[in-house]
Image (cartoon, rainbow, N blue to C red):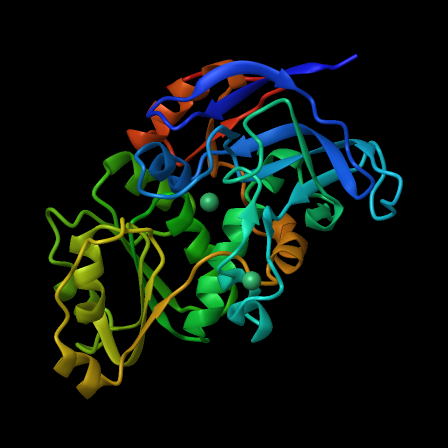
């Protein structure tokens, strides 16, 4: 008999369709997960706004954790009852990026929650090789952050953050705070945030980052210069992904500075950059996307990262649309769906 589950389905329109769909029993190489937590990513919002390609009808949610419920005949890497996290991408293996050791840039990739049914449902059926065991001391709820943290880790590794560096982070949502945590692990001496939302500035300070400024009332360039002997920051990260912050980022960087575009800006949006500045200071302007070989490593570190308080809101799967509205309004930091409860819908 076919079992049914509650799921939030992207059907190509601007709102999610809450419906009951069959639970897909695992094939020989697959794992059936009972979802614990699935967090909402900016990409999910972009999918509904048609700024990021997904393949409807599909259950969204690419950042999720859960318990293994059943495994296929050939699966030996996990067992029913295991607490696991998912790195949701699979790559073709045949395109140029795949064949030069950059599979995360694969041009023919698939991802659960983008083109395959993902985590905003009570169950998900995934390939065994995207399932990762949790290290001791990592709660399942926090394990849903591993996908985002794997992307954050890629950005920090691209930037080569070093001991004693000054790091400026433009945009202090969940990603901004996680970027700060990893920059700190790499030895950053000071971290300066720019964030227009007062509640988020308070949250940033709650995580121990005192230097959180409102760009509307602070001249950030002055502020950065006053704390770096007039030179600028070693590392500047645009975690907001809007033209104003992207354009500002290179201006804040010092000699030999590194600038990262981490926040996702919609395709087609443009900014102006002064090439002479990049030339004269030997700036490196970098991008980072996804999580190449970072998921396993970041999971090991996560119990020591102090992630409590990153997920600020929880909703049941039946309230997924409400959860998306909260995420779009910038309520709290990270908004999560707990498809099998418990939920405390507060926004
Ligand atoms: Zn994401
Ligand atoms: Zn490929």
Ligand 2 located in image quadrant: bottom right
At which x and y percent is residue 123?
66, 26
Task: Specify the quadrant of the image occupied by residue 34.
Answer: top right
In the displayed structure, would residue 243 be above or below residue 336? below
At which x and y percent is residue 250?
21, 70
Quadrant where the N terminus is found in the figure: top right
At which x and y percent is residue 301?
63, 56
Residue drawn 33% across the image and 29% down it = 331
- Extreme-front residue of the structure: 94
Residue 266 visible somewhere in the drawing: yes
Q: Tell which of 333 and 275 is nearer to you.
A: 275
Quadrant where the C terminus is found in the figure: top left
At which x and y percent is residue 180?
42, 57
Q: Is residue 50 left or right of residue 315?
A: left
Residue 161 visible somewhere in the drawing: no
Q: Tell which of 169 and 325 is nearer to you.
A: 325
Q: Tell which of 23 and 34 is nearer to you.
A: 23
Q: Is residue 347 left or right of residue 275?
A: right
Residue drawn 76% across the image and 37% down it = 31
In the displayed structure, would residue 71 be above or below residue 130? above
């Amino acid at each position: 008999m076919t079992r049914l589950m509650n799921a939030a389905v992207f059907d190509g329109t601007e709102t999610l369709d809450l419906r009951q769909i069959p639970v897909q029993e695992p094939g020989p190489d697959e794992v059936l997960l009972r979802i614990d937590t699935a967090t909402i990513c900016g990409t999910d919002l972009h999918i509904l706004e048609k700024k990021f390609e997904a393949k409807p009808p599909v259950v969204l949610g690419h950042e999720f954790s859960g318990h293994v419920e059943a495994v296929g005949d050939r699966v030996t890497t996990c067992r029913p009852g295991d607490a696991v996290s998912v790195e949701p991408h699979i790559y073709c293996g045949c395109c140029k990026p795949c064949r030069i050791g950059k599979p995360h840039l694969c041009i023919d990739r698939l991802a659960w929650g983008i083109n395959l049914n993902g985590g905003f449902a009570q169950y998900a059926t995934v390939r065994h090789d995207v399932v990762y065991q949790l290290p001791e001391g990592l709660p399942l709820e926090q394990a849903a952050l591993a996908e985002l943290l794997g992307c954050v880790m890629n950005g920090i590794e691209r930037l080569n953050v070093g001991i004693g560096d000054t790091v400026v982070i433009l945009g202090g949502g969940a990603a901004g705070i996680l970027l700060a945590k990893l920059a700190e692990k790499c030895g950053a001496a000071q971290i300066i945030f720019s964030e227009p939302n007062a509640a988020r500035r308070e949250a940033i300070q709650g995580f121990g980052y005192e230097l959180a400024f409102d760009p509307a009332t602070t001249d950030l360039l002055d502020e950065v210069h006053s704390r770096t002997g007039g030179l600028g920051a070693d590392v500047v990260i645009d975690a907001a992904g809007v033209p104003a912050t992207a354009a500002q980022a290179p201006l804040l960087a010092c000699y030999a500075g590194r600038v990262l575009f981490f926040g996702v800006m919609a395709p087609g949006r443009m900014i102006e950059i002064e090439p002479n500045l990049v030339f004269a200071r030997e700036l490196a302007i970098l991008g980072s996307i996804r999580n190449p070989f970072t998921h396993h490593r970041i999971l090991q570190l996560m119990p020591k990262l102090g992630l409590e308080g990153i997920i600020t809101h929880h909703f049941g799967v039946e309230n997924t649309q409400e959860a998306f509205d909260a995420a779009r309004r910038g309520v709290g930091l990270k908004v999560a769906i707990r498809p099998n409860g418990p939920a405390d819908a507060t926004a």
